Image (tube, rainbow, N blue to C red):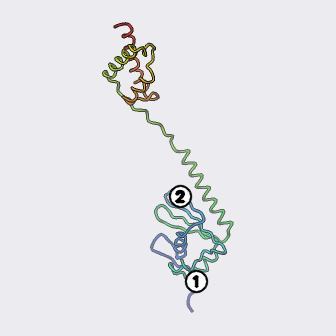
Amino acid sequence: MPEPEQIRPFGPGPLATRTDAYIYELSQEGLNDEFSATDGGWLGLLKADPSTPLYDPAVAIKTELNEAEQRFLLSKVGVIIEQKGGGGVTVDYFTQPEELDAAWAALQETRADVAEERDMDAEPEIPEPPPTLEVTSAMLIEAEAEGRQDAQQGSGRGSTPSLARLDGWAAAYGYHPETHGNELGALTDAWRQGVYREVAGQ
């Protein structure tokens, strides 16, 4: 008398049984839901319904399922597949829809908790300080000359360079008012000195 058929192992490789191999092949055609795992792998939900049972003869041909394996699949309402980042694959089978939904919901909740912990543990990004730009003696001499020029033209009677003058320095030297206040301050002082000397006739 022949021995009754059983679910057979599948391998070598990451899949444990022939039903696992079949389910993995079936998952390539689409899943009901899926998300990425923290280790670089993924988890997928595959649910059966009266119109689309887990057993599909067209796919089963590729994995050569016997009758015991076919009956096993027809008795299940769905599976959860996990492919780990290292390549391993596990398949969990469910006979009750409530158990399947609860298990999937628990996995999603765990994933959300891990993501929240990762966000809390992440160190805040500290912006890098802006680069310090050199103020050379030639630049100060030029700024003083510009102060004299502005005074001669009547636009340098105040103590602050015009916006046009400040924009000119920013364009010429790469300064930004919000990040290079010290550099612009040095040029402004030299500009003021030029204004005062021109006004005083020095």
- The residue that label 1 is drawn on is 67
> Residue 92: percent from the left, percent from the top?
58, 68
Element assignment for label 2: loop
From mark 1 to mark 2, how far is it between C-alphas? 34 Å
Q: Residues within 10 Å of mark 1 (few under 14, many from 20)?
A: few
- Image coordinates of residue 199 in percent, x first then y, are 39, 9
User: Residue 189 appears in which quarter of the rendering?
Assistant: top left
Mark 2 closeness class: few <14, some 14–19, many ≥20 residues within 10 Å = some
Secondary structure of the residue carrying tag 1 is helix
Looking at the image, residue 129 lies above or below residue 37: above
Query: Quick one: which residue is furthest to the left in this view?
Result: 138
Q: Which mark is residue 177?
A: none
In the image shown, does 135 or 194 lie closer to the viewer?
Answer: 194
x, y (%) of residue 174?
A: 38, 31
* Residue beneath disc 2: 37
Q: Amino acid at mark 1?
A: Glu
Residue 107 image-quadrant placement? bottom right
Q: Quadrant of residue 157?
A: top left
- The residue nearer to you, when weighing 128 against 162, is 162
**Residue at 43 percent of width and 29 percent of height:** 176
